[in-house]
Image (spheres, rainbow, N blue to C red):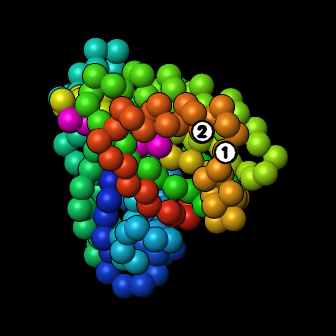
Amino acid sequence: MTVFTKYLVTFDGRDAVQAAAAIRETSKYPIWGVWAGMFGIASNELIVMTTTVSSPDFSPDSSPDRAADNLWPARTRLVSHESLRATVRPMSNEPLTRDGLYVFRSFYLDAAHIDRVVALSQEAWQTFETSTDYKTEPIGLFAPTDPAPDSTMYLLTWYDGLASWSTSRNPHADARAIFRERHALLHSTTAVATRLLV
C-alpha cells in the first residue's frame, strides 16, 4: 500500500520555487508534488505531498509519515500533515510534472459515506473529463488512512487553466446529476487553486 502524506508548510522569504527546490533536496520521502497557491492559501505556504510504500502489515499508527518526521529545510516550518490513501486515482505514485491549474477540493463528510463518494466520483468522471468544452483530469481522490467519524477527503483535479475550470462548472448533464448526489453526502467543501512547482 502506498501512503500519501499531505503537508502544509510555511517558508521564509518570497521565492516559492526556491523553497520547493530545497524541500525536494531534503525530503526523506519521495515527492509526489509541491504546489504554490494561486488563491486559497498564503503566498508563503506550500502544499507538499510525499509517498511511502508501507509494509504488508501496514496500520495507520505505524506509518512513518504519520509521525511528521520528514526533514524540512532551514526556514521551512510544518503547519499540518495528514496521512492519506489513494482510492480510484492516482493509479501510480510517479511524480507529477504537467503544467496547469491544480485544484485541491476538500470534502468534509461522515466516514460512512467515503465509499459512496468514491463510486459517484468515478461514475461522474466518465462524462466530466471527456468534454470538449474544457480540458481537465481528476488526478487523485484521497481518503484518510485512519478515518474518524467526521472525515476529510481530498480531490485533486488538473485543468489547463482558469478558463477551463470556469467552464467546467457547467459540466455534462449526467456528470452534473451525479455531482449533486455526491454533494448531498457532504457536510461542506472548500477549494484551493494551485500551480505545480516542478
Q: Is residue 165 above or below residue 30?
A: below
Q: Nearer the viewer, residue 51 or 91?
A: 91
Task: Tell which residue pokes out farthest to the right in this image.
Answer: 132
Of pointers 1 and 2, the one earlier in the residue sequence = 1
Task: Tell which residue pokes out farthest to the top in this image.
Answer: 57
Q: Is residue 173 above or below residue 79?
A: above
Q: Is residue 120 visible?
A: yes
Q: Nearer the viewer, residue 130 or 25?
A: 130
Which portion, as a residue range, is magenta?
A: 150-155
State the count of labels: 2
- Residue wearing tag 1: 171
- Residue wearing tag 2: 176
Mark 1 to mark 2: distance in Å?
6 Å
Amino acid type at mark 2? Arg
How far across and how far down the image is residue 91, in percent? Answer: 57, 29
Q: What residue sits 46% from the left and 81% below the top?
A: 15
Where does the C terminus fall, quadrant-wise? bottom right
Q: Residues within 10 Å of mark 1 (few under 14, many from 20)?
A: some
Q: Residues within 10 Å of mark 2 (few under 14, many from 20)?
A: some
On screen, residue 55 versus residue 31, left or right, reads: left
